[in-house]
Amino acid sequence: MEIVFTDTDELRRYVQGVDGTMSLETLRPEFTLARKAVVDTVGEKVYLALAEENDAPVYEAIRMAVANYTMFKHLIFWATSRGNTDQQIYKYQYEEIKDEYISQFWAAMDTLLLWLDENPDTGEYKSSPLYQERQTLPVHDALEFDHYYGIDRSPYFYSKVLFLIRKIVKENILPRTGDLSRIEDASLTDRIKRCLCYHVMAEAVMKFDLTELPRSTRWDLTHEFSKTGSQMQVREKLYSNLMSEVNGWYTDIEEAVRLLRGSSDRVANSNEERNKFYATI
């Protein structure tokens, strides 16, 4: 079963801005993109299973996600069609509508992913790469990430940065710390997680489209470049500020790990058989 809408009146239940000039046929290309956006996050099997959950709140969430992403992608065509009429919209209005659609899409996706965490057997979600990979990472979910860097507690954003978490852990964290499961110092573990989340956000700020960032981050960036007129300069400034913190923490982490290893080595080697003494603590 697919997520379908029978007419524009039904579509209007889930998204604002649908008017009489639109038809479902006109929106078909954008529906395809919306479906792909959801499937890319949860997988085909989960998507089809969710489409069967007619009585569950998540059914409304997935329809809202599809509807709002559809209108988000269609907005440019709708706005262009009004360009030569007395109903044309200003750029600031266009940006506000665009932000509203993407915010509604994110809210729906967050609801969907939270529901899946509580019902992981749906569509074999528990065996999906998204679910499985999270279990192997130092920061397991959006709530934990948000504890270290505010992402509006968004499971959807967390799902989008998993590849960055994996990359940074492999290339920047593990070479400095070794096996994280062997670190028993809670303070050091906390510092490592904070450093990881800040580094992820620094990378995301430079790599992601503005609409792919959490709403609070989007607003901060938008406010700043409305004053400077250069989105890239604002991104680069935030990246630089975040990486300044990150690099400082990496230095601290390296020193803490070195001290822990040195202490461990001294304890381990003090009572070797060749020594003529027996050390106690």
Image: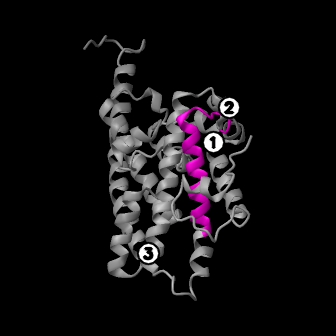
Residue 145 in sight from this viewpoint: yes
Residue 92 placed where, x, y %?
42, 77
Q: Is residue 276 above or below residue 39?
A: above
Which is nearer the N-term, disc 1 or disc 3? 1
Question: Mark 1 Cα within 10 Å, few/some/many (few <14, many 20+)?
Answer: many
Residue 16 placed where, x, y %?
51, 61
Question: Mark 3 Cα within 10 Å, few/some/many (few <14, many 20+)?
Answer: few
Which is nearer the N-term, disc 2 or disc 3? 3
In terms of secondary structure, what is the magenta stretch mainly? helix
Specify whether 226 is left or right of 63: left
Residue 69 placed where, x, y %?
58, 58
218 in the magenta segment: no
65 in the magenta segment: yes
Q: What residue is disc 1 on?
A: 42
The amino acid type, in three-letter code, at marker 2 is Gly
Residue 145, located in which quarter of the rendered image? top left
Q: Is residue 132 above or below residue 87?
A: above
Pointers 2 and 1 in contact (CB under 8 A)? yes
Which is nearer the eye, 256 or 132?
Answer: 132
Question: In which quadrant is the N terminus drawn?
Answer: top right
- Assign a secondary structure to mark 1: helix
Specify whether 243 is left or right of 121: left
Question: In which quadrant is the C terminus drawn?
Answer: top left
Which is nearer the eye, 184 or 201?
Answer: 201
Q: Which residues are the magenta region?
A: 51-74
Q: What residue is disc 3 on?
A: 93
Q: Comparing marks 1 and 3, which lies closer to the viewer?
A: 3
Question: What residue sits 50% from the left and 52% below the top?
Answer: 106
The amino acid type, in three-letter code, at marker 3 is Gln
Q: What residue is disc 2 on?
A: 123
